[in-house]
Structures are given as C-alpha cells and as structure tokens.
Image: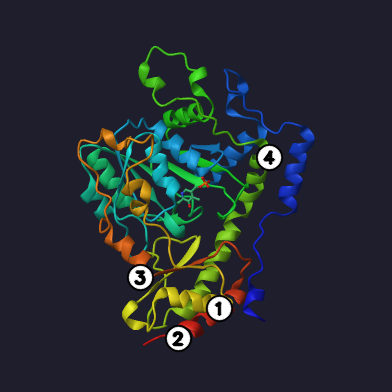
Amino acid sequence: MKISKCFEPHNSIGKEEMRAVKSVMRSGELSRFLGSKHPDFNGGKKIQEFEEKWASYFETNHALSVNSATSGLIAALGAIGIEPGDEVITSPWTMSATAMAILHWNAIPIFADIDPETFCISAKSIDSKITPRTKVILAVDVFGQSCEMIEIMNLAARYKLKVISDTSQAPGALYQNKFAGTIADIGVFSLNYHKHIHTGEGGVVVTNNSDVAERIRLIRNHGESVIETDNSINLVNIVGYNFRMGEIEAAIGIEQLKKLKSIVNQRQENASQFNQILMDLPGVVTPKVPEENTHAYYVYPLKIVKDKMRVNKFVLAEELKKNGILGISTKYQNLHLLPIFQKKIAYGSAGFPWTLETVKTDYSKGLCPIAEELQDISYLGFYMGGYALNGQTSRKIANSMATVLAKYVQ
Ligand SMILES: *Cc1c(COP(=O)(O)O)cnc(C)c1O
C-alpha cells in the first residue's frame, strides 16, 4: 500500500452524533439558556446531561460546558478572582489562547521554561519565576500528557497560588491514576475540531469547588444581571460574557464522550508502533512518558539530535513530506517571542496592561532556552489527530519514516 493511502482522514462523527443532532433539531430547542433569573439560566436538557456525564467520566464534582476552551480559560481565571496586574506563570510552548486568556483580564503572562522530555512546563522553572505578584500557575498538558502536578501543587500550596490546567490536548491522559486536568483547582478542555473529541467548537471546565463552579456559571451567562448582593466580592469579574454552548453541540458532546476512551487507546496503540520502530534509530529521540502516567498523543513528538544527523530538521521534514508522510511539523510555539509580547501592545496603543507593571517583564530571546532549542533545532512533531490510523498503517508510516531518517544519520 502506498503511504499516502495510509492517510485516510479521521472522522469520529458517526450515526450516533447524527441521530442525536436530529433529535435536538426536531425538538426545535437549539439552545435553552436564558440570561436572567430563571430555571433556564444554566442551560437546557442536553447541556445538563452533557455536563453530568462529563463530571462523572472525569470524576469531578462539577463540569461546565462553554463555547470554546479559550472561553473556558477566561472563565476559569475570572472565577478565581484574578486582578489586573497579577502575574500568571504559564508555558511558552502552547497555543496562544493560553496566554491570551491571562492578558484578557489585564494580568501579566510570565513564561517559565518547559521540561525537555515531556514538553510541559517544569515545576523547577515555575519556582524560579514566582514573585510576590504571582497569583496563578496556568499549567499546560501539552501534546497529550500531564504536567508534573504533584510538584506544581506543592509549589502552589507553599506560595498560596491557584492552579489551572489547560488540558485541551490531553483529555483522557492519566497522571498517577487520575485524569489530567482534574488535579488542579480548575481544568479546561477543548472540543474544537482538531482535538481528540469535538463538537465543532466547544469546551468544558471542571472543578471540585462549588463556589468556583457557581462563578463560572455566572461568567458564562451575563451573571451581572442576576446577582443581588451586599458583598462586593460577589461582583468581581462577572462582566457580561456569553460563553454558552448550544443544545446541538451538547448532544454531539454526549456521543463523542462515549468514544473518548477508544480514541485515546487507539492513539496509544499507534504510538507504540511508532516507538518500537523509531526507538533504536540513532539521532532520533522518541517521546518519554513517566511510568505512572499515560499519554493521549495529540501530537507524537520526536526530537532530532543535531550532532547525529547530516542535515537539520527542516530538511528532514521536507524529505519526510516528499516521501508521503503528512502531518509533520517542525515548529510549535515560543509565545514569548510573538510581537504582542516583544512590543507589549495588547489593549490600546500605550502598552496596557504592561503599564501596570512595577517590575518590567522580560520576554527577550533566551528567556526559555529549552523551548527555544526545541523550536529552532530539535523538535519534529507528528499530528496524530488528522488520520484514521490503526496499528498496521502506523507501522507502515513509522517504517517509512525510519527509512527516510536513517539515510541522514551521520
Ligand atoms: C486548542 C487549544 C486551546 C483553545 O481551544 P479552543 O477550544 O479552540 O478555544 C487552548 N489551549 C491549548 C493548549 C489548545 O491546544
């Protein structure tokens, strides 16, 4: 079989989702949220059912649906009472939404470096960035595996910080037998088209804290219009959003959630085929997963050892593509190097919110050497989500990859 034949597009939307959508269509109630004091303030039947099922699957007290993970991150930061000028420590090796959610509250993103083996933000680097202004650690479970949560939660306890997990890329991954995203104070999942399971667009926020859950419900749905309070704390950060998910998406989400386990299992099986074939190739480092954890493989990340290869990773990627291996990427993100941070221009033209800073935040190149080295030299990723891979096709692709890469070993 030709390699390109192995790349049938993955499509997890089936009869089940179609049936669920039709039933919502027939009911005529495509959303039942009301932004005022009313039993429908928290959404309709499918929203309620989806949230109950998500909370039960992930073993959390609360799951709140939202219209994207970006909205979920904004709601999560708002709900824990972030203030303008607060510092939030996060990873540069993530999608921009993670850092934008921080800026959104006029708080300051502080970038800590990542672990060279898991690509997740490292507790040691977080520790070195904590100041009296730090309020939150926004840890990103990147590529499909959890951050080192015990170490991160210990730091948070020591410095009285809150922790939010951006688990958009790791639904169903385990950290010491608990689901990634459920150890932090709040976890955020994405249901956009590129993620393991999707509703087109969508997201879910999980927490065990009832007060936080209630604040997320208020932020999600014009909460300012329903709060009657003598206590000004209750009003903090409830400022007029609509982050609601519709009934159609919720109905799709209920069916997609049933498929999560098998999708993650299949990706683990595919990755083990890749590992077996690529592991012994000189010049290539396959993903490391600490023994007590599992990886959900949003991306299968390889590292190229520069001194062992005759050409750089950009040439290798071109060669892989020429040989029919799609889904290869040479870069991810170094968010601190984006113009928005280099120029410190976000809200208005005068540099707000950085004009709130008492100590100037450093976003210069060299700030996160491990993330920068990965970006410039060693990282080569394979996006596992786009293709209907099974064990056999994964073996074929990995074999072709190995043949191409072996040609360039020194
Ligand atoms: C996809 C993604 C997001 C944003 O998700 P949306 O649902 O598209 O808003 C945020 N963070 C990470 C790490 C992501 O991969």
Observer-side mark, 1 or 2, equals 1
Q: Which of marks 4 and 3 precedes in the sequence?
A: 4
> Front-most of 209 and 344?
344
Question: Which residue is label 1 attached to?
Answer: 322
Res. 281 in view: yes
Please state which of the two labelled residues, at mark 3 or mark 2, is closer to the viewer: 3
Is 129 on the left or on the right of 227, as rendered? Answer: left
Q: As drawn, is 394 to the left or to the right of 22?
A: left
Residue 216 or 150: which is nearer the viewer?
216
The residue where tag 3 is placed is 377
Determine which residue is flagged by label 2.
406
Q: Position of residue 272 (x, y in %)?
A: 50, 72
| For the residues bearing labels 3 and 4, Cβ distance under 8 angstroms | no
Residue at the location (57% across, 17% down)?
37
At which x and y percent is residue 134?
26, 39
**In the rendered image, is residue 182 in sight?**
no
Query: Residue at image x 54%, y 75%?
Result: 321
Spot occupied by residue 394 in the image (x, y as percentages of width and height):
57, 74
Local packing at callout 4 (Cα closer than 10 Å; few below 14, some 14-19, many 20+) is many
Give whichever of 365, 161 is nearer the camera.
365
Q: Secondary structure at mark 1?
A: helix
Q: Earlier in the sequence, mark 3 or mark 2?
A: 3
Disc number placed over residue 248 in the picture, else none: 4
Residues under numbered marks 3 and 1 in contact, where contact means CB atoms less than 8 Å apart: no
